[in-house]
Image (cartoon, grey):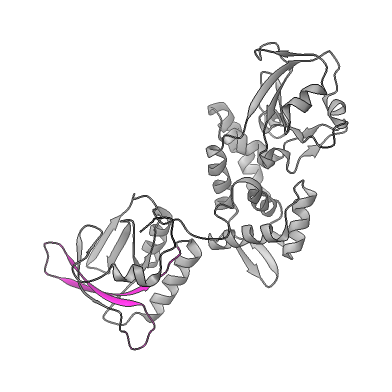
Amino acid sequence: MNAIEKITESEMLRSLVAGSVVLDRFIVTESSRNRRDQSIDATIELELCGEKDRFRFAVEAKTASAPRAIESAVAQIQKATGPDENPMIFVPYLSPESLRSLEEAKVSGIDLCGNGVVIVPRRLYVVSTGQANRYPDSRPLSNPYRGRSAMVARTLLSGGRWDSLNALRESIQAAGLDLSLSQTSKAVAALQDDLIVTKQGGAIVLNQPLKLLDQLGAEWKRLSPIRSRQAFRLPLGTDVAKCFASAANLQWAITGESSVSRYAMFAQGGPQRIAVSDLQLAQSLLPGKPEVATTFADIELLETSEPGYYFENTRDEQGVRWASRLQTWLELQAGDARQQNAAAEIRNQLLSQK
């Protein structure tokens, strides 16, 4: 089967026929999907290779692997498991984090990739992990921590609770990004699937700011958002903000790397780095001359369409657009050892606001 296709529960359960192998060490000796009460999807009996003992499991299958789907499956199977059975869930993929949650709940779990944990209290504990996900979730938004959708997550970090989806969207727009209500809704739904936010009536509530911050940081490290760059030497007294003010269609802001002194003690050398949406246009607005190297340059323009550079900028009295505290942290935590030390201080500031 093509790994990117959506698999059905029936297809999953057909893989648990008698004689099949689970986690490379268990043999399915018996499998049944004819439960009278219909409260679970199947019952199976497993035999550990080389041993005579057999263990019976009640199985709840789900076609989604997101944390919310796994949490739901665990709750269902715990309620439906009989006295002579052990609870087990079956999903396309179990991440290391999902396996830890299953261990805490004392519920077994297997996936289609070779990961899983088999638990029989006081008798058996076997875990297998490290296999890649061959069945990525099919959901309206694949990654709420990257690109335009990540601005929803950033806005949630700045507030924590929003009375309505529309209020959240208005805050995103005020921070510098025109995102549709549909796009905002899809991003919130994806964050719900990951158990990072919940909905309480019409309100949207951030439950796990630390996890959300870590996810944003991990995705930023994978980005290569700079298309091109150019160093410039400027005449003394050049006001870059005034130079750029005449171009309404130019997005620009000081990068987090060059904004760090606003949030932490850090000696930043080299030219001031400025993100711009159009390098050619930005160059045409500046006096001075391009430099081949940054050694004698005053600024370095970085061309990028990544929305994070232009989101939640703070402006000083001179009209200079500085990176937000969050953007500064994202850039530094992906940098060298000195930058990562400064990032740790800014991370504490971000979390103390929650």
Q: Is residue 170 above or below residue 317?
A: below
Instruction: Determine the residue located farthest toward the front in the rendered image.
Output: 2
Does 58 sit left or right of 20 as displayed?
A: right
Please indicate, yes or no, whether residue 141 appears anywhere in the rendered image.
Answer: yes
**Looking at the image, how many numbered discs can be counted on the residues?**
0
Picture quadrant of residue 297: top right
Image check: 289 left or right of 54? Answer: right
Q: In percent of the image, x 26 and y 74: which residue is there?
A: 44
Residue 40 within the segment the image draws in magenta = yes
Task: Name the side, left or right, on which 265 lies relative to 174.
Answer: left
Q: Position of residue 340 (x, y in %)?
A: 56, 32
Q: Nearest the camera: 223 or 259? A: 223
Could you tell me which quadrant the N terminus lies in? bottom left
Name the spot of residue 268 as percent of width and height, x first.
Answer: 66, 23
Residue drawn at the location 77% of the way across and 54% of the way down: 171
The magenta stretch spans which residues?
Answer: 35-64
